[in-house]
Image (cartoon, rainbow, N blue to C red):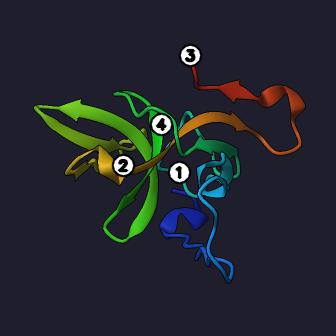
Amino acid sequence: MSTMSAKAVIRIEHADGALDACASAEPYALMVLGDSMLPEFAEGEVIVVEPEGVAREGAFVVAFHEGEHIFRQLLRREERWLLHPLNSAYADRPIDGLGAVKGVVIQKQRPGERGSRKSYVE
């Protein structure tokens, strides 16, 4: 494991005032922290998340689980949804339903490398 993968936490604080409904549905970018999604997603890569994306089995998603946002692959096993890390050093996390999914990853890119963009939409 990398030294940053212990459990890097970045607090997201909302700006004063309410967000309008349109802004909350806009795609946003996040930086990958840790090694739980190796080999497909390396620490430092930037992912673009579509909050209105369709969460299908096998999709890479951002979900709210046990009080935190988590980036994983969405899988279905024996009638249960799981948040699955690609790195086998980490455990699957079961979720009660798709309501926990807050967005679907549609793209990734390594910072500073124009040709490194990869799309995850059909």
Q: Give whichever of discs 3 and 2 has the lower sequence position.
A: 2
Quadrant containing the C terminus is top right
Which of pointers 1 and 4 indicates the residue nearer the eye? Answer: 4
Q: Residues within 10 Å of mark 1 (few under 14, many from 20)?
A: many
Q: Residue 41's x, y, as percent? A: 59, 40
Q: What kind of element bears circle 4?
A: strand
Q: Give whichever of discs 2 and 1 has the lower sequence position.
A: 1
Q: Residue 46's x, y, as percent? A: 70, 46
Residue 4 appears left or right of 99: right
Q: Looking at the rendering, which quadrant does residue 56 occupy? A: top left
Q: Nearer the viewer, residue 54 or 89?
A: 54
- Mark 1 and mark 4 residues within 8 Å of each other at the beta carbon: no
- Mark 2 and mark 1 residues within 8 Å of each other at the beta carbon: yes
CA separation in Å, label 1 and label 3 = 26 Å
The kind of residue tagged 1 is Asp
Q: Give whichever of discs 4 and 3 has the lower sequence position.
A: 4
Q: Give whichever of discs 2 and 4 has the lower sequence position.
A: 4
Residue identifier under label 4: 60
CA separation in Å, label 2 and label 4 = 18 Å
The kind of residue tagged 2 is Ala
Taking the spot 52% from the left edge, 40% from the top edge, the residue there is: 52
Taking the spot 54% from the left edge, 46% from the top edge, the residue there is: 51
CA separation in Å, label 1 and label 4 = 15 Å
Residue 87 appears left or right of 42: left
Q: Residue 72's x, y, as percent? A: 43, 45
Q: What kind of element bears circle 1?
A: loop
Residue identifier under label 2: 89
The dot on residue 122 is 3
CA separation in Å, label 2 and label 1 = 9 Å
